[in-house]
Each structure stands twice: as structure tokens, then as C-alpha cells.
């Protein structure tokens, strides 16, 4: 996977530590409006025994976006 030029230019110069705050601010400013979809999940469903907890969930993840799924 190639790092987009936008993100390459935001990296600190050699010798500086890469902080979580720096990474977060970089991701907040990453333009995702025209980014291509890198992951598409369609019609996600989950149930435990006879209890449905998710029904018909669709997800598009674009380059530069971050998502976490917690069971």
C-alpha cells in the first residue's frame, strides 16, 4: 500500500517522535470526499441465538478513514 503524498508531507522530520496527537490531527485533515472505497461490506447481519443484534448494515470504508468494530 502506498502512502498518499498528502500524508507523506505531514510526517515529522527525521529524529522527531511520531505522536498519537500528530496522527490524529493528520487523519482529521485527510480529504476523504473523493477517496476511493477500499473496503465494502454489504448486508451485515449478526444474531445471538434467536436475538438479532444487527440487520442489513452496509459499510463503505474509504482510503484514509479509520473504523473499529467492538463485539
Image (cartoon, rainbow, N blue to C red):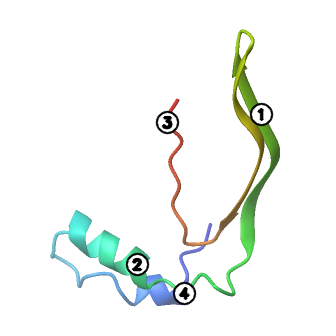
Cα gap from disc 3 to disc 4, whole angstroms: 26 Å
Viewer-nearest residue: 10 or 33 = 33
Q: Which residue is mark 3?
A: 70
Viewer-nearest residue: 15 or 71 = 71
Residue 8 can be seen in this image: yes
Q: Within 10 Å of the Cα at label 3, are there few (<14), some (14-19), or many (20+) other Cα atoms?
A: few
Mark earlier in primary sequence (1, 4) = 4
Cα gap from disc 4 to disc 2, whole angstroms: 8 Å
Residue 31's disc number = 4
Mark earlier in primary sequence (3, 2) = 2
Quadrant assignment, res 40: bottom right
Residue 28's disc number = 2
Q: At 25% across and 75% down in the image, what residue appears?
A: 22
Q: At 51% across and 61% down in the image, what residue appears?
A: 66
* Mark 4–mark 2 CB contact (< 8 Å): no
* Mark 1–mark 3 CB contact (< 8 Å): no
Mark earlier in primary sequence (3, 4) = 4
Amino acid at each position: 500500500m502506498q502512502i498518499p503524498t498528502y500524508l507523506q508531507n505531514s510526517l515529522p522530520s527525521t529524529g522527531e517522535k511520531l505522536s498519537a496527537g500528530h496522527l490524529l490531527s493528520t487523519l482529521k485533515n485527510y480529504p476523504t470526499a473523493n477517496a476511493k472505497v477500499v473496503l465494502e461490506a454489504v448486508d451485515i447481519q449478526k444474531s445471538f441465538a434467536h436475538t438479532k443484534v444487527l440487520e442489513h448494515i452496509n459499510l463503505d470504508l474509504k482510503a484514509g478513514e479509520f473504523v473499529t468494530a467492538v463485539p
